[in-house]
Amino acid sequence: NGLAIQEIKDSFGADYISEDQSLNRKKMSDLVFHDKKALDQLSLIVHHYTLKQMSIYLDQLKASGEKVAVLDVPIPVKEGFLDLCNIVWNVTANEEIRLVRLQNRGMSIEDAKRRIMIQMTPAQYSELADIDIDNSYDFDILRKQVNQLLEDSLGARGLPYKKI
């Protein structure tokens, strides 16, 4: 979130900001996935600005007459994100699949395991959700699950939605 850059710079130092004034994602991830306090600090900063932007966006949608909005939030926060939602879907996959997917994105097995260990557990995510979606298979299966849930949740109530 570009709005958070100055606060990140103030909290972590200029080394974590690239020459183009964007977040140095590699350096920051090396820090926060080895230091829980740093992760918590970064999360506080980013969530503050993200929530502010999401609220503005949702207000604009509401003012334009939109009845449905989907928020793609990797880390739901009880106070804030969840307060904005009528229904929460948790998309998850088993740990083996998650590890493979992280490695396919260029991450070492050690870093992938560390990232998974520092995150909320699948049970904690599930506790926050109204619906759990298993993404341990291919994208076509996920798409079918999501489209069925859209139909069940929105279509059945006459609300507009687009299939994915």
Image (cartoon, grey):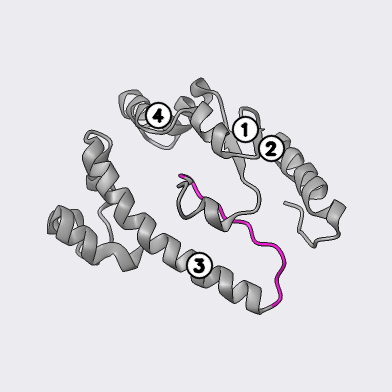
Q: Which residue is mark 1?
A: 135
Q: Which residue is mark 3?
A: 55
Dot 1: few (<14), some (14–19), or many (≥20) neighbours within 10 Å? some
Q: Could you say which is closer to the camera, residue 143 or residue 50?
A: 50
Tell me the tag on residue 29: none
Q: Nearer the N terminus, badge 2 or badge 3?
A: 3
In magenta segment, residue 136: no
Q: Is residue 30 left or right of residue 147?
A: left
**Label 3 element class:** helix
Q: CB under 8 Å between callouts 2 and 1?
A: yes
3D distance between C-alphas at marks 3 and 4: 29 Å
Percent across and percent down for residue 163 are 76, 53
Q: Which residue is mark 4?
A: 116
Q: Residue at x 41, y 30 (%)?
A: 103
**Label 2 element class:** helix
3D distance between C-alphas at marks 2 and 3: 28 Å
3D distance between C-alphas at marks 2 and 1: 6 Å
3D distance between C-alphas at marks 1 and 4: 16 Å
Residue 17 seen from this side = yes
